Image (cartoon, rainbow, N blue to C red):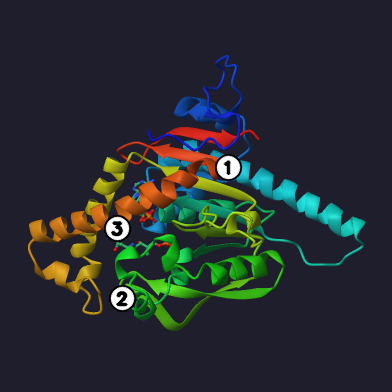
Amino acid sequence: MSALPETIQVSPFAKRRHKTRVPSLFLEFDREEWQELAESTPLPLSEDEITELQGLGDSIDLEEVKSVYLPLSRLLNLYASGTQHVWAAQREFLRSDDKKVPFIIAVSGSVAVGKSTTARLLQALLSRWPDHPRVELVTTDGFLYPNAELERRGLMERKGFPESYDRRALVRFVGEIKAGRSEVSAPVYSHLVYDVIPDQRKVVRSPDIVIIEGLNVLQQGDSPGSTEVFLSDLFDFSVYVDAPEPIIKKWYLQRFEALRETAFLDPSSFFRRFAEISREEALATASNIWDTINGPNLSENIAPTRSRARLILTKGANHEVERIRLRRI
Ligand SMILES: Nc1ncnc2c1ncn2[C@@H]1O[C@H](COP(=O)(O)OP(=O)(O)O)[C@@H](O)[C@H]1O
Ligand SMILES: CC(C)(COP(=O)(O)O)[C@@H](O)C(=O)NCCC(=O)O
C-alpha cells in the first residue's frame, strides 16, 4: 500500500484495539469486526428487498451486501439524521424557515475500482430508510469539458485529470443543491459516445441525500491561500473505494473486454473499432490507456486524496471488502 500524506501530527492509520502511542486518524475494522457491528444494528430491509438489489445489473454477492454495505448504509443513515437535527436546530435558532439541507455523500477512487457500483448500491440502500427516501446519484463526468474543448486545450489524453473538468461548474452545482434549491441540473456524459451530450441534463429535485461520484471529488486544487470554496467543503460524508493498483488495472481490462462484446458493438460507440480488431490488440490498447492515462491519474491525483475521506473501503481481488477504515476525528 502506498504511503498516505501526513499533514497533521497523527498517524493516518494505527491498528484498532492495539495500544499505540501515536493517535490515529482512522479506526480500522477487518471484515469480521465490521460484521459484528452489523449484527447489533437494526436493518429495516426484508430478505426480499435485499434480493431486489441484485436487479441493479451488477453481479454483487448478496452476502457482501448484507455484511458490508447494509451496515454502511446504517452508519450513513445515522450521520444523515444527526446532521438534519443540527440544521433544524440552526433554523430554529435563526427563526428561519429555510428549506431542509440535503445530505451530500462523495464517493471517490480510481477508474474501475467500483465507484459506480458502490454509489448505486448505497443509493438503493439509503432510499429504503424512511427518513430519507429521495436519494439522487450524480456522476462528475458530466462536468468534463466536451471533447471539442479538451482538443482545443490539448487535453484529450488527460481525460479524468483535474484540469479536464469544469470544476467551478461542479462546485456551483453542489453548492446550489446544498443551498436548498428545489431543482438543480447537471450536464450528462455518455461513456458510449465518449463525450458530454449536448442538450441533455440530469435533474435533481428536492433530494434528501445526494451522492456525488467521481475520480476528482476529494481534490482541493493547488492554490494555497486561495479563498475559493472547495468541493469537499460541501460534503457531509465521503467514501474512498480502494484496492491495489494491479488489481484495479485487471478490473479495467476485464470491463473493457466485457464492453467489447456488448456496448462497443453499438454503431454509435466511440470504441466501435475495438470490437473489430482482435481481442489481443484491443486489450493491448486498453492496457496502454491504463498505463498512460488512468494509472498515472490514480497515483498522481486520486490516491493522494485517500486520507481525506471519512471512510475507506479496501477491496481484494474478487471485489470483497477486506478492510474498512473510518475517521475517528
Ligand atoms: N462489489 C462488486 N462486486 C462485483 N463486481 C464489482 C463490484 N464493484 C465493481 N464491480 C465490477 O468492477 C468493474 C468496475 O466497477 P465500476 O463500478 O464500473 O467502476 P468505476 O465506477 O470506479 O469505474 C465493473 O465491471 C463492475 O461490474
Ligand atoms: C470518464 C472518466 C474520466 C471518469 O469520470 P468520473 O465520472 O469519475 O468523473 C473515465 O471513465 C475515463 O473515461 N477516463 C479516460 C480514459 C479511459 O478511456 O479510460
Up the image or down, 24 lies above or below 259; here it is: above
The amino acid pointed to by label 1 is Arg
Q: Quadrant of residue 22?
A: top right
The residue identified by callout 3 is 293
Q: Counting other residues with Cα less than 10 Å from the Cα at mark 2, is it few (<14), some (14-19), or many (20 or more)? A: some
Is residue 159 left or right of 90 when viewed as pictured? left
Nearer the camera: disc 2 or disc 3: 3
Report the residue marked by disc 2. 193
Q: Estimate the x, y position of residue 39 in percent, counting from the top left.
A: 57, 30
**Local secondary structure at mark 3:** helix
Q: Nearer the viewer, residue 328 or 221?
A: 221
The answer to whether 310 is drawn above or below residue 148 in the figure is above
Quarter of the image with the N terminus is: top left
Amino acid type at circle 2 is: Val
> In the image, what residue occupies the spot 68% across and 43% down?
78
Residue at 67%, 53% in the rendered image: 130
Q: Secondary structure at mark 2?
A: loop
Upstream in the sequence, badge 2 or badge 1?
Answer: 2
Residue 203 relative to residue 60: left or right: right
Quarter placement of the C terminus: top right
Return the x and y of residue 193 as percentages of the image width and height. Answer: 31, 75
Q: Identify the residue under disc 1.
A: 310
In the displayed structure, 36 sits above or below 70; it is: above
Q: Residues within 10 Å of mark 1 (few under 14, many from 20)?
A: some
Q: CB at mark 1 closer than 8 A to ligand 1?
A: no
Give the quarter of the image for residue 176. Answer: bottom right
Q: Nearer the viewer, residue 139 or 289?
A: 289
Q: Answer above or below: position of 319 versus 252.
A: above
- Tell me the distance, in whole angstroms, between the alpha carbons under discs 2 and 1: 34 Å
Mark 3 C-beta to ligand 2 under 8 Å: yes
